[in-house]
Image (cartoon, rainbow, N blue to C red):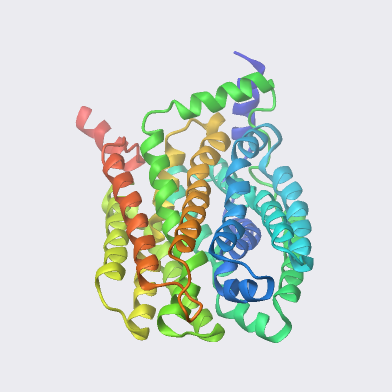
Amino acid sequence: MSGATVDRKEATRADGEPRGVAALALVAILTAIYSVSQFLRNSIGVIAPDLARELGLGGTDLGLLSSAFFFAFAAAQIPVGIAIDRYGPKRVMLVCAAITVTGALLFAAATSAGVLVVSRMLLGLGCSSFFMGPLAIYARVFPPERFGIITGVQLGAGSIGTLLATAPLAASAALVGWRASFAAVALFAAAAGLLVAAGVRAGTRPVAGGESWSEALAGVREAIAMPSFWPVFLVHATGYAVFGTVVGLWAGPWLTDRFGFGLEGRGTALLAASLAQVAALFLWGASDRWLGGYKRPVLLGGTATCLCLAVAVLMPLGATGARLWLVGLGASVAFTPMVMAHGKSLFPPHLTGRGITLTNIGTMGGVFVMQTLTGMLMDRFGRTAAGGYPAEAYRLVFVLLAIALGAALVSYAFARDPHPCRQRGMGLRKR
């Protein structure tokens, strides 16, 4: 048996399952640092019209600005996955916290579109481990059957960052400006990093510390070759891209251009959508137990999301209808905990870090692609005499998202479902 294999087993055995207050404290600290990522990835939607006006940004500029975060985030996933397995998730998150603070301060000081894009890339790089690091820890210290619901809790509670990127950010931008608001985010990111340094103990040891870099890269290839990796990856790439592209970027301009919403109205409507998503994340996170596997919740949520997009294309929505539609979309697209749990279940323990970060490339890469494409699409239509974008442009954005997610769901329907309850059922049938 190789030294690397021994290290993996010893690291896994050494971490007992935290219980009671210790478990709550662990989840609370990891949720706090994850909320920074949730805020930053969704923070452009509310202030997009203000950035465009102050710095003269067009649709392509806004798409690139928002998507730069997701590009850097996705590009970092393979090295982050290797680093989590080799050096432990805690060390990786602390390095990333320092990068995040730097990016937030640079964003607050930016005076041009180019500097904003660079700062957004730093923010994407910095936040690249704030979800994967916690998931790697949970995978090591909690039983597999609890992973889905804990992931739902992490996503739901961590989505306070998404909530803060709506009406609270709008209020803060109106009161002190978006620059001071992002300086405050830098302070919060620094505090969250200190909490991780002081309070996270369980599940932080490396599980592949004895691997050479060639073995580490071989592990990446092994993870990619796992059965059903690609169907799960495609749902990652298209599912969250709906939320990231609509709520994270175009919903704010859509509400302004189509229904005359101002800064406060945009913030309130997006807050309602995000609250719906947060509440639904907790429900979707436990749905594998009710529905007996990972695939059924994902197919149900994905289909509901496609239907929501179809409603925006085909139905005449007024201001109240637009608010309700955003709430419905937020609740429907919150099936992502099940996609993540399904992805994690495909990989053996020593590939957990690399496996979940590889699937997360789909999540962030999908948003990058969709935000960039839709930004160029909006500029192809051009602005109206009133300065906004025409209804046809937004409809085409919704159609593009629905087609991409629908095609991914067709592929996903044939994926293997290794949920623990299904494995137990198969064992009973064999006996």
Screen quadrant of the C terminus: top left
Foreground pick, 384 / 370: 384
- Residue 425 left/right relative to 85: left
The answer to which quarter of the image holds residue 110 is: bottom right
- In this rendering, the answer to whether 326 lies above or below 10 is below
Q: Tell me where residue 256 appears, x and y as whole percent.
A: 47, 80
The answer to which quarter of the image holds residue 429 is: top left
Residue depicted at 35% across the width and 36% down the height: 418
Screen quadrant of the N terminus: top right
Which residue extends farthest front?
A: 385
- Residue 290 left/right relative to 109: left
- In this rendering, the answer to whether 159 lies above or below 180 is above
Q: Tell me where residue 8 appears, x and y as whole percent.
A: 61, 27
Q: Tell me where residue 43 appears, x and y as whole percent.
A: 60, 67
Residue depicted at 61% across the width and 71% down the height: 52
Residue depicted at 60% across the width and 24% down the height: 217
Foreground pick, 248 / 292: 248
Q: How many marks?
A: 0
- Residue 169 left/right relative to 388: right
Could you tell me if residue 54 is visible in this image?
A: yes
Could you tell me if residue 20 is visible in this image?
A: no
Q: Tell me where residue 326 appears, x and y as whole percent.
A: 39, 73
- In this rendering, the answer to whether 233 lies above or below 163 is above
